[in-house]
Amino acid sequence: MKRFISIALCLVFALPLCAQEEYSKEEYLRRYNNLVERVGPAGIGVETLLDRWEAAWPDDTNHLLARFSFCLIRSQTSQVVQMDRDRYLGQAPLLPMVDSLGNKVNYFEVLDFDDELFAMANSAITKAIAARQNRLDWRFAKIDALMAYEKEQPEMTLQELKALVDYNYQRKPDWEHEVLGSVSQEQFKALMQDYCAALFRIGSDTSAEAFRSLSEHLLTYCKDDPLYLNNLGSYYLVKKDFKKARKYFDQVLKKNPGDMSALKNSILMARAQKDVKLEKKYLTLMAAHGETETDRLSAQTRLEAFGKK
């Protein structure tokens, strides 16, 4: 959750109250930076400066990013809520407690959003992206904000991610990123896997379907990519559809018998099915191709234990 709270701060180009005369874009940016250093991106005086900046330079992307930061932060309120669950949005409880009967009582921090202010933030970052479509960090800021806003129902988040995937593979842009600089296709693929993992961690039915859908969408451009095949295997493993899970894990292992994600999940799947023959098959692969000596020895020990029964 803290990641989403801080996304606005990452974009601050960071802006003191100005006089009534009109300034250049550069002067507004300088004044904004100075003000934010003192009061933060949503502090006293920032909105007044943003309004004057917008009136003078409505299409300035620095203003749009500053407006996004301001509206996003102002839209958020935080509360601590008791929930009858062990995790919320992939996070452990803020305050794990036990009542007088020994029952778990978990408290989680929950972000709520003012819809109107969030819409203004979303509109500002969308306009900035339209002006500079190759700014990947701006696109990620929009997606992260949507993911925080939608919580366990990441439907708009999924559509934004799919649109980003389409743009990347159809346009092949020269991405720009504030921290990473240029972004290669391999880096882009890894970043998309990070979002797949984030959707999976949320833990709701809707986020699980988004995880599956995004992985399938990526496979239309990255045919037989083990990252996304393993994703689908994991999805069906959690759903206990072992036949489909095995299909995807075996696709990965056919090309790379030492893929540890596919191997470990396949062993877990065989154990869940109580299928000793199948478990031996995957243990044999791990004993031969495991990444570490510990993995290989563990698999071999397990195989030997089977032989003694």
Image: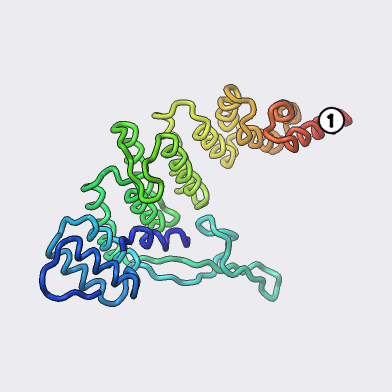
Q: Along the line of sight, which residue is nearer the eye, 97 or 182?
A: 182
Relative horizontal placement of residue 67, taking residue 219 as reference (left or right): left
In the picture, the quarter occupied by the C terminus is top right
Name the kind of residue labelled 1 in the image. Answer: Glu
Q: Quadrant of residue 36?
A: bottom left
**Image x and y of residue 243, in percent:** 59, 30
Relative horizontal placement of residue 191, taking residue 296 as reference (left or right): left
Residue at 22% across, 60% down: 63
Most extreme residue toward the right is: 308
Q: Quadrant of residue 238?
A: top right
Local SS, label 1: helix
**Image x and y of residue 57, in percent:** 14, 60
Residue at 49% across, 34% down: 228
Residue at 61% across, 36% down: 261
Q: Along the line of sight, which residue is nearer the eye, 266 or 223?
A: 223
Q: Along the line of sight, which residue is nearer the eye, 77 or 296?
A: 296
Relative horizontal placement of residue 300, taking residue 120 as reference (left or right): right
Most extreme residue toward the left is: 21
Residue placed under numbered mark 1 in the picture: 304
Q: Residues within 10 Å of mark 1 (few under 14, many from 20)?
A: few
